[in-house]
Amino acid sequence: MNLPRLTAIAVLSAALSACSSSTQSLPAAGTNASAVTNPAAIAGTMDAWHDSLALNKLPSAGCFKATYPSNQWSRIACGTPPRNWYPVPRSRKPHLGQSVGDGNDFTLDATPNIISSAIGAFPKVKGVTSVVSGGQQDSYTMQLNSNFFTTAQCGTLSNCVGWSQFVYENPPGTEEGALFIQDWLVATTRSGFSSCPPNKGWQNLGIGCVQNSPFGVYLPNINVTQIGSAVLTGDADTSGDSIYITVGTNAYGMKNVQGDGITDLSQHWQGAEFNIIGNGGGDAATFNSGSKISVNIQAVDGSKKAPACPSNSGTTGETNNLFFTKAPKKVTKLKYPSIEFSMTSQSGGTATCNTAKGK
C-alpha cells in the first residue's frame, strides 16, 4: 500500500463521521480503460473513490458498506460481537527488542490535545505469507487502543481507569471477521475488582470490568497477505463512538455503535496504539520468517503538531513474534500528525520511531 493512497484513506476515515471538503470526483465505472492495465491509473481512481466517499458521510447510526466504484453507503445487517477478551499487559517491564506487545509497543502521544479520531495502517508489508495465533492459522487481531485514563464511569471503584479498544478480529479459516469496540474499567492494583458498576452491562473479570459494543460488523476474512490494504479507524464523540475499516475495494462503517458515556473516551483520549497481534487472551501472533511490517498511526487532535512516540507504552496484553527495528528515516507528511515504526522477524538493530506533523 503506497503512502499517497494512505493519505487518501486517512481523509476518508476521519471524514466518515465529520463532513469533508474534498471536491474530487470519481470516474464513471467502465469508462477508464487505462485503469485496467495501468497501476498508476488504478491508484488514481481508487484515491478518487476514497475522496468521493468522504463527501457522503454515513447517513445515520448503524452498519454500512461501500464497494468500489460506488460512492454510496448501503446499510447492512449489524451482528453480535464475538465474546473474546483482549486484556491489559501482564508485564510492564521495558523490553524493547523482544516480541512486540504486552506493553512493549510504540504509541502516538498527542498530549495535551484530545484525539477525536485515530487511524492505523501498514504502509509497507513485505514477505508476510502466514500467521498463527492460539495454534490456528490466519488468526490475529488488528487493535487500535486508547491510553488508560481517569473516568467518572468508574463510579465508586477505587484504583480504576478507563480503556477503549477498536478491534478487527480475524478468525481462522474462511469465517467472517468481526469489527467492534471493546471497553474496560481496568483495575490498577493486583487485588482487582470484586464488583462492577451495576446495571451498566459490565462483566467482572477480576482484572477489570469489560463489555463489547452492542453491535459489530461482519466482513469477509482478511488473509494476512492482504493487511497492506487495510486501514482501521476509531472515532470518539459525545454523540457516540464509531469504528471503520477499509480493505481493498471495500469499506465498512459502524456509526455511533455505542454511547460515548461507557468510558467517556471523547473527553480523555490522548494516546493511541495500533498493531497486528494475537487473537485474544494475551495470545501471540506468530509470523513466518522473513516478515517485515511498518506501522503508521495518525491522530485527529485539532493540531498539526508532530506527536510524541514513547516506547514501552502499549496498552494491550496480546503480542506478536516480531522485533522492532530502525524506523523509516523520514515519515511522509500525511493530513494528520502521525508516527511510524517498523517490525521484522529478524532480531537485531536499534528500535526507533519517527514522527511527522500534519499538513
Image: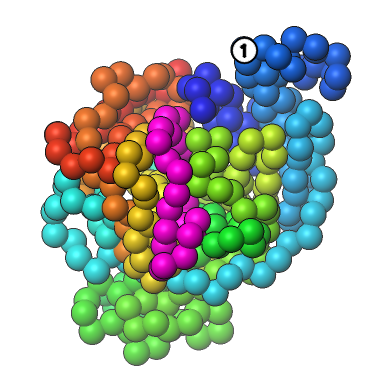
Packing grade of label 1 (10 A; few <14, some 14-19, many >=20) is few
Which range is magenta?
Answer: 115-142
Front residue of 193/90: it is 90
Q: Is residue 245 something one can see in this rendering?
A: yes
Answer whether residue 137 is magenta in the image.
Answer: yes
* Residue 220 on image: x %, y %: 67, 52
Which structural element holds mark 1?
A: helix
At 41% from the left and 33% from the top, the residue drawn is 126
Image height check: is 267 above or below 297?
below
Q: Which residue is mark 1?
A: 40
Looking at the picture, the colour scheme in use is rainbow
Residue at the spot 55% in from the left edge and 40% down from the top edge: 226
> Dividing the image into 4 quarters, which one contains the C terminus?
top left
Work out whether residue 110 can be spotted. Answer: no
Locate residue 131, reporting x and y percent: 43, 53
Of residue 319 and residue 49, the one placed in the foreground of this image is 319
Residue shown at the point (22%, 30%) measured from the top left: 326
Instruction: Answer left or right for 34 relative to 284.
Output: right
In percent of width and height, residue 44 lies at: 65, 15
Residue beneath the point at 80% across and 16% down: 27
Horizontal and vertical percent for residue 358?
A: 42, 23
What's the residue type where badge 1 is placed? Ala
Q: Is residue 317 above or below residue 236?
A: below
Left/right of residue 19 with respect to residue 152 in the rendered view: right
- Is 332 or 278 nearer to us in this picture? 278
